[in-house]
Image (spheres, rainbow, N blue to C red):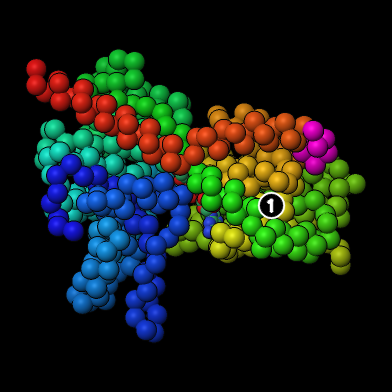
Amino acid sequence: MSPKNSNKVIIVSNRLPVKIERKESGLVISPSEGGLATGLGSIYNEGNNIWVGWPGIIPENEEEKSFITDELRELNLVPVFLTEEEILGYYESFSNEVLWPICHYSPSYAVYDSDNWATYVQANEKFGQIVREYLEPEDTVWVHDYQLMLLPNILRRQNEKLSIGYFQHIPFPPDEVFRSIPWRNELLLGILGADLIAFHTFNDAQHFLDACTHILNIPIRNNYLQIRGRSAYVEVYPMGIDFDKFNTLSKDAAVKERATEIKQYFKQRKIILSIDRLDYSKGIIQRIKAFEELLKNYPELREQVVLYMLVVPSRDKVKQYKKLRDEIDRRVGNINSVYGSTDWTPIAYFYNSYPVEELSSLYVAADVCLITSIRDGMNLVSKEYIASKEETSGVLVLSELAGAAKELIDAVHVNPNSMDQISHALHFALHMSEEEKLNRMSANFELVKKFNIHHWVEIFFARMREIKIQQKKEFAR
Ligand code: GDG
């Protein structure tokens, strides 16, 4: 692959879709299988297209660096090597201790530090520098997520005519919440370097437009605005999942056998499943409290139901996440010791990451999937559960504050801050007739099947192409 080829697509995200492990035999590089990687696979694996991002490892020497670079190049991936200081200041601190809490409507968690801001700027510039090594004027660049809010404008400064898209995977908060960030103007202007700025939901897009008007004083016209003589469009593209993967897995003989084993292990009790990364935005504490309410309010359900809670380790170096983990441990221990018996542990809690086949068996085995996010851009777990339920029945209980609730209107919706509502919804789900389960599930199933990850990528790029043609005409005038 030669660095400069015209008319190609460059995807940029904080992390590359790859796992690099240091083993005795040396570095082992394997592609990681997230939904985004699958969806974008049809793009970055093609021709001269590339994906630029952090490979998730700090090379120990120049030799390792060039080994990683060469190996990744075979996969159309281009590494941005970050130093330890950059990882701390840009990723762990500014991204995850300012932007994450602010975008999840939790300003009290935000920690403002101008050194971390400077490192965030520096890291975004570094991504820009690597992208520039490959960039040609006719290229299309698709920037992903809040770690790279400044990148669209960094690239725009180099080329007014470049086609740039930005997708934010997490919510965008009301403008008065975003205003709390001392560097909000720079961040907004950074994103506005893109031609197409997209979010999962209408509310997120509207909040972004509000911020542009109220903070930057830029007048908006419907869904677009004019900035330095260019148009920037703000639109809504709800992300889908790799439907085929989850649907096919759920019908796989080994997966089904494992699901039966799981059911047997829990003695055919009803299984309420939750899967999420360790994060305060996911409402894990609320979920545990609501489950306790269920056991209190409906004593007849004791011994009859299990909450299977898989929490995937995440950001465990950040203080608030360590505190959250301790609180989960304490509350789960308390419920299990108060309500449990020699024969029954109410909450089966695992702080671990499983292979996708095990995830699939859990989806197949679960009677209820419980999502209690306090805020969530989309929430893919809810869609994966639905895709896995073609042959078995189940009920999705879904927070109305997750982006997915806007699409999955046939789920049982709950306000995650009401323990009463969640416990009643669980009771309702556990007693729902098979007919109602099927009706609700099939409506959601068709939607998840149709608006899958490939559809999402296609419509985003189709719109990028349209905008490019339109802007060429504008430039020609
Ligand atoms: C961000 C936004 C938005 C989980 N545990 C395991 C595992 N997973 C996979 C799930 C799912 C993914 O991780 C989690 O996706 P979510 O959407 O639920 O949440 P975030 O990680 O917070 O993602 C979110 C998303 O971006 C996309 O735009 O929906 O709102 O916060 O795919 O299956 N996968 C494996 N083992 C596990 O133990 N293999």
Q: Residue at x 64, y 57 (%)?
A: 252
Between residue 226 and residue 242, name the one nearer to us.
242
For residue 321, side relative to residue 266 (left or right): left
Q: Is residue 400 visible?
A: no
Look at 63% across and 42% down and name the residue there: 386
Please give the name of the residue rendered at 23% of the width and 68% of the height, measured from the top-left corner. Answer: 70
Percent x, y for residue 217?
Answer: 26, 20
Count residues near mark 1 (Cα–Cα under 10 Å), then give few for <14, some for 14-19, many for 20+.
many
Residue 432 among those drawn in magenta: yes
Q: Nearer the viewer, residue 215 or 306?
A: 306
Of the residues shown, which amino acid type is indicated by label 1? Val
Q: How many marks?
A: 1
Q: Which residues are magenta?
A: 428-435
Work out whether residue 107 or residue 370 is closer to the camera in this orientation and state it: 370
Task: For mark 1, give the secondary structure.
Answer: helix
Residue 187 in the figure: left or right of residue 294: left
Q: Which residue is at 57% across, 63% downward?
A: 354
User: Relative to residue 179, is residue 86 depicted above or below?
Assistant: below
Which residue is identified by label 1?
364
Predominant SS along the magenta part: helix
Q: Would residue 60 be found to the left or right of residue 415 on screen?
A: left
